[in-house]
């Protein structure tokens, strides 16, 4: 073999090194943004208003994810290219979702926002429907309710409706439901809300207990209470026949009706704008209370039949769920028989979900004008 000069040897070795370097650079051995399995340039940052930034994936499936401050999460993985586009968190906890070009993952839903988890709103199905029942009078309605087998006798129930004299079927009206104390009647009785502004500014419903008292007393177990499907049935029927503003449904009551109201405050808060009760509270054996609703609670300081601990249990439950502090300030119920300022409003509650507690002089009181006047003022105050 012919001998090469030192200069030729040096040139040959240099060319070999250069060739291997170029081959390595072209074969993907580096960690550049186009190499298999590597993430794209960056995932989008969280927007100040809850909007997630877009995320760009690498050529073979990198993922990008970002979450807005209001609870919406956007997450996506593109199998062959870019990840899904921006996902936006809604103020009431709507879900953000994005998908990659060939099937990425959906974003997770955020928590409920300030609106209380999406309460019903808008006009009910009864809007525009002519009402033949006389306005300003109670009309009797009998209905069938699906209840737990142990309460099968309570599948036949009754309630009463009373639209205001100025009722217009093309205008959405607030709805106020009232439960009286224990009794043996089967017809509509007088009730405190009839003496106040609710009688002229809302469609009224009077609920009727089955054979005396509602199945929601202080020692009751609300897990299978027939009052829950009864309430659901009444609400559905009234909204189907009358023009109701579904964002303004209020439940109230006295004594047995107050315990009924406490049950609804615990288990049906998601469909209620507010509750008001006198001489009642929260059952000892109750399901976990969920949802937010405004609440005003009245109890006589000398009421031996209404355990104070259970009244305060309901108040504290509302305070906790509505995000209030334990700091209170005096609250004026308006026209009242009591002059000692018995009502206090808890501070710092989330907008739309105030809580008021009135410890009034006397025994097993119905609240007097705090109930007839103050409940409506509380429900309709900004």
Image: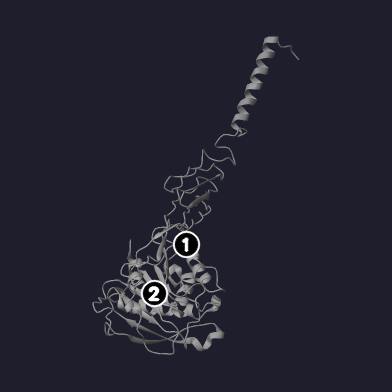
Position above or below: 230 against 276: below
Residue visible at 30% across and 77% down? 199
Residue, disc 1 = 319
Residue 150 vertical placement versus 106 (above, below): below
Closest to the camera, between mark 2 and mark 1, is: 2
Element type where label 2 sits in the image = loop
- In terms of depth relative to the viewer, which is nearer, 289 or 376? 376
Against 118, residue 303 (above or below) is: below
Q: Alpha-carbon distance for marks 2 and 1? A: 21 Å
Label 1: how many Cα within 10 Å (few below 14, some 14–19, many 20+): many
Against 250, is 107 above or below? above
The residue lying toward the viewer, choosing from 368 and 189, is 368
Question: Residue 203, position in %: x, y?
Answer: 32, 76
Quadrant housing the N terminus: top right
Q: Nearer the viewer, residue 367 or 249?
A: 367
Q: x and y percent of residue 332 in the render?
A: 34, 64
Sequence order check, earlier mark of 2 and 1? 1
> Which residue lies at the image location 45% right of the left edge and 68% below the top edge?
269
Which label was assigned to residue 367? 2
Callout count: 2
Q: Are marks 2 and 1 in contact (CB under 8 Å)?
A: no
Q: In this view of the protein, can residue 354 be seen by the observer? A: no
């Amino acid at each position: 073999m012919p001998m090469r000069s030192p200069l030729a040897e040096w040139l040959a070795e240099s060319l070999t090194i250069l060739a291997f370097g170029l081959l390595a650079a072209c074969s993907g051995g580096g960690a550049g943004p186009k190499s298999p399995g590597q993430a794209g340039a960056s995932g989008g940052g969280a927007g100040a208003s809850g909007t997630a930034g877009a995320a760009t994936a690498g050529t073979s499936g990198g993922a990008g994810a970002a979450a807005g401050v209001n609870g919406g999460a956007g997450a996506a993985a593109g199998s062959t290219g870019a990840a899904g586009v921006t996902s936006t968190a809604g103020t009431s906890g709507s879900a953000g979702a994005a998908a990659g070009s060939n099937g990425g993952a959906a974003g997770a839903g955020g928590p409920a926002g300030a609106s209380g988890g999406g309460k019903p709103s808008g006009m009910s199905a009864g809007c525009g429907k002519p009402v033949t029942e006389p306005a300003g009078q109670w009309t009797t309605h009998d209905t069938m309710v699906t209840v737990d087998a142990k309460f099968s006798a309570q599948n036949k129930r009754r309630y009463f409706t009373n639209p205001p004299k100025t009722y217009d079927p093309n205008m959405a009206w607030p709805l106020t439901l009232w439960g009286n104390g224990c009794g043996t009647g089967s017809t509509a009785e007088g009730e405190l809300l009839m003496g106040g502004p609710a009688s002229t500014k809302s469609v009224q419903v009077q609920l009727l207990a089955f054979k005396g008292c509602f199945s929601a007393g202080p020692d009751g177990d609300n897990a299978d209470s027939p009052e829950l499907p009864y309430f659901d049935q009444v609400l559905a029927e009234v909204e189907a026949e009358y023009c109701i503003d579904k964002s303004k449904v209020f439940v109230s009551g006295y004594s047995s009706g107050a315990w009924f109201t406490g049950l609804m405050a615990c288990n049906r808060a998601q469909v209620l704008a507010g509750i008001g009760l006198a001489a009642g509270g929260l059952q000892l054996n109750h399901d976990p209370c969920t949802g937010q609703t405004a609440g005003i609670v009245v109890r006589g300081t000398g009421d031996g039949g209404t355990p104070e601990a259970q009244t305060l249990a309901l108040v504290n439950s509302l305070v906790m769920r509505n995000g209030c502090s334990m700091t209170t300030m005096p609250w004026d119920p308006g026209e009242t028989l009591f002059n000692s300022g018995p009502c206090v409003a808890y501070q710092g509650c989330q907008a739309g979900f105030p809580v008021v507690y009135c410890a009034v002089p006397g025994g097993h009181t119905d609240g007097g004008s705090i109930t007839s006047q103050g409940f409506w003022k509380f429900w309709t105050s900004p």
